[in-house]
Amino acid sequence: MVHIAFTGGGTGGHIYPGLAVAAYIQKQGNYRIFWIGSDRGMDKAIVEHTGFEFFGVPAGKLRRQVSLKHGLEALKVGVGFFAARAILQKEQPRLLFSKGGFVSVPPCLAAASLGVPVWTHESDLSPGLATRINARFAQTIFTTYEETATFFPLSYYDRISLAGNPVRPEFRCADPRQGRTFLGIKEGEPILLVLGGSQGSQQINELVRETLDELTRWYTVVHQTGLERGWDLEPCEKYRPYPFFREEMPQVLAAAALVLSRSGAGTLWECAAAGRPLVLIPLSGSGTRGDQVENARVFAKAGAAVVLGKPFGIEASPEALRATIAAIAEDKGQQNAMAAACARIGRLDGVRIIAERILQYLDTAKGESCSI
């Protein structure tokens, strides 16, 4: 049996795409896949829910500044390195695939120190700090966008491969009728799906609150609030709030005529796989490195999205949101063109591309052994 290690975590966006690749590989033959993630947070629950083995290690957040607090985080990275190294020595994987995030750095460093091939993937347009570190010793660097290669040194180019962002196959073949059945919304009633990310979005939630009367003139609003409690807008025929969508998300997304969302990489590519037109309000400002703004620009340039926010010269205000939603609702030609543009982006099947490359490598390297 061939053993393959996966790593990544800290957020769902650094876990779910990797799990989609892992599931594809496991269906192809006699492979044992295990995941190395953070010993705190959501990682363990998400991975074990899918049936894969999970090993937790300490994970320190990567910081560019120097301080006592950041020194403690660096210490966690060191402890995580030795913990991951012990796991890899025991489990003997033939390859480590990293989906990024600060959690992935200790396992990737440990794998490199043991001679285990490291492959990594970057979801965003520009690579984050974790990917920049992991890429130094990665054998293969997968990117979501062709332009991402320009952020790396020229000496890396022969190791970079375009793959798109891995998305669960369910998003490519979901039945909108099942989504409508789950929501209790009849055929022919257009749906605006509002997504604020896995933790919700206070900004988007408040914009919905302030514009709901106008939004429901055009659509039945299905709103993932990200809140188990404390949301005080009552459900009605034209407004359906939900704390979270889980297994039903692909079907709900397929039923939507339009999506209002942040622009995290995972959500964008789920929408692309489903071919849904987008109104985006990217997270921006001092609390982010700007990855959502960059991702949103790619989709706007392709004609797949309309983007609101200061970096785009349009304030994400109730007035701007009302006008944007009304303009799209009244122009079916624009809505269809945006959907087609989004689907063109989503044709790049990251799960299949990455998984087949890994399988091809493992098949070619059958007679070889790692230096663990």
Image (tube, grey):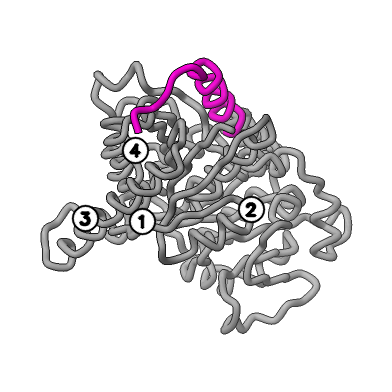
Q: Nearer the viewer, mark 2 or mark 1?
A: 2
Q: Nearer the viewer, mark 3 or mark 2?
A: 2
Which residue is located at x 51 percent, y 51 percent?
280
Q: Earlier in the sequence, mark 1 or mark 3?
A: 3
Q: CA distance from mark 3 to mark 4?
A: 22 Å
Residue 51: image tag? 2
Q: CA distance from mark 3 to mark 2?
A: 33 Å
Which residue is located at x 41 percent, y 62 percent?
39
In the figure, residue 184 lies in which quadrant? bottom right
Compared with 90, 323 (above or below) is: below
Q: Is residue 267 left or right of residue 114?
A: right
Give the residue at mark 1. Answer: 284
Kindly indicate whether the residue at mark 3 contacts the one at mark 1 (C-beta within 8 angstroms): no
Please state which amino acid type lies under the numbered disc 4: Ala
Q: CA distance from mark 2 to mark 1?
A: 36 Å
Give the residue at mark 3. Answer: 63
Q: Is residue 191 visible?
A: yes
Q: CA distance from mark 4 to mark 1?
A: 34 Å
Stretch of the chain drawn in magenta = 351-372
Q: Earlier in the sequence, mark 3 or mark 4?
A: 3
